[in-house]
Amino acid sequence: MKKANQQLTGAETLEIQLIKLTDITPSPTNPRKFFDEKKLAELASSIETMDIIQPVTVRPAKSNSKVPYELVVGERRWRASKLAGKVTIKSIVKELTDQEVEDMQFAENVERDDVHPMDEAVAFRARLDSENNTDTIEDIAARINKAPTFVVQRLSLLNLIDPLQKDFWAGKFNMSQAVILARLTQADQKEFLREGGQLKNWDGQYKTAKDLWAYIQRNVMNNLNSVAFKKDDAELVPNVGPCTTCEKRSGCSPLLFPEIKEKDRCFDRACFKKKTNAYLVNVITEAFENADDIVYLKESAYDLEPEIEKVLKSYNLKVLKEYTDFRTIEGKSAKKTDAVTGMWVSGHKTGSRVKIILEKKAASKAGNGATISATASVNEEIERKTERLNRSEELDYEKVMAKVREKVNAPEIGKSKKALELPLTAEVNGIAFYILLDSLSYDDRSFLKAIGLNDEITQKSKPNYRDYLLKLKQLTDKEKATIILKAFLHKYGMIQTNSQNLESFLLRQLAAWARIDIAAIEAEQKIVADKRRENYNKAVAKLREKAPASVGKKKSIKDLVQ
């Protein structure tokens, strides 16, 4: 390390030293992660002839570092010097705390004239996430003499997916376009980029900011003012939360959406769809259970979402098609005696209700329990309502069992130590043997009939499951042992066994229990092994008689090395 010259900085004179490039490691806290290769090459060319003008700043590295210095500011100059083939670099060594390092790096990365917006975004985020930071967005804005909107919009750029960030770095679109693209969810960005035409023109260039914004308004943005579900419902979709506090809602992020005056615009179309579908499933289920007089309507240009179609089919509910099966009515016409309440389950009007008049050919098709027309048969109507009632009662049992399963699987029972505190009752013991029986192959189950546990019991039209469990509880010790043996052999009987294998050890125990003479089997195998050994010894002896004295002797490590 050599001294170069002196540099005057304020009232402080700092010594410039020549430090080997290999003795310096980049700082892990430097927010700048992207370096333009073309500009780096240009700087390297300049350094080859003129060297660097501004020294880099370093500090003594921490004790666990493999090199003596950590680079604080000047990583671009350091990289370019390596490209230029330099061995040393002008450096100023300072004793700095972690906080002082972060402060210097922040200033270095946001106060340059040529700073890229992504560099600013990374620097702002690093500042806010630092353990030592006390600055807010407003504090950062004041520090750089900018409005808070400037900081928030830079931070939003970090939401861009990697391919878009690379294109932004490469100058393929500007800041206005970047902010608009960053408002999309990453899933939408990937989809639109994959489809190409959504974000780019025919020539491969990105659409203008105006065109991008128009596209988002038409195809992504949803108006929360007209939704059927409650915006403050935090339980509608698990682990999502309410719309009222969502950062993808314009009203919650006015700094990110300063030009949008409406507070209820949603930019997460996937979440919007999930909430709409969840609301529909709940409403359809509730209407079915309450036997409400309502029919379900489909917009002609839109298909049903899979989950909506599934729930309608589970209740055997038909969907009426727009223009074909009904016509909507408003005002006084909606009070007609043959008017029916319908709910849209597809399209832009999803979740909203409307009065309709059924076409004659659709009267029998509706079949949803609604009062379809004056000509409908009373018997048909009773039959439909009876069918719905029976189906509802079937679903009641399914719902009860779903809740039971949820409770059993709850962390406080099935997934905790509390399960170890529960007593082993006769019922639970019976269930354990059912699990073993259920694992058996068809051939292994043949002996079950003899103990009254054949499959015919559970396959009757009205099986008596209590009797089946009672028989499981009353199994004798011999019957239990037989079931255990067959279940074990079914699962482990064909595995490779050796002395180091737990299953082979357990198999020996079961064999001993089954009064199998293991000693006799081992003695028989020993005769074969002894004969094999005898033949081996004879063969080796003959070979040694024919070969030189050194052949056949065990070589030492020294012999092998030589």
Image (cartoon, rainbow, N blue to C red):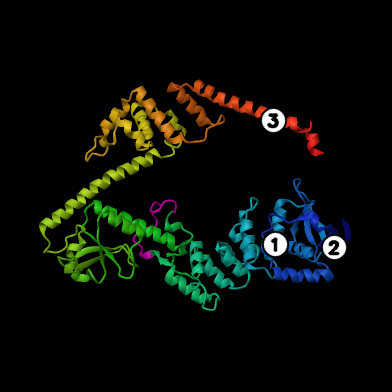
From the image, which quarter does the N terminus lie in?
A: bottom right
- Residue at the spot x=64%, y=50% of the render? 131
Say whether disc 3 or disc 1 marks the residue closer to the N-terminus: 1
Helix, strand or loop for the magenta stretch, by majority = loop
- Residue 44 within the segment the image draws in magenta: no
The kind of residue tagged 2 is Gln
Say which mark, if any, is on residue 209.
none
The kind of residue tagged 1 is Ala
From the image, which quarter does the C terminus lie in?
A: top right
Q: CA distance from mark 2 to mark 3?
A: 86 Å
* Tag 1 residue: 107
Horizontal relation, residue 310 to residue 520: left or right? left
Horizontal relation, residue 315 to residue 28: left or right? left
Camera-near label (3 vs 1) is 3
Is residue 552 visible from the viewing direction of this image?
A: no
Given contact means CB atoms under 8 Å apart, are the residues at marks 2 and 3 in contact?
no
Is residue 317 visible from the viewing direction of this image?
A: yes
In this view of the protein, which residue sits in the foreground, 521 or 67?
521
Which residues are the magenta region? 225-240
Q: Secondary structure at mark 2?
A: strand
Q: Secondary structure at mark 1?
A: helix
- Residue at the spot x=34%, y=34% of the render? 445
* Tag 2 residue: 7
Horizontal relation, residue 338 to residue 196: left or right? left
Percent across and percent down for residue 342 are 24, 63
* Tag 3 residue: 540
The kind of residue tagged 3 is Val
Camera-near label (2 vs 3) is 3
Say whether disc 2 or disc 3 marks the residue closer to the N-terminus: 2
Say whether disc 1 or disc 2 marks the residue closer to the N-terminus: 2
Q: Quadrant location of residue 328? A: bottom left
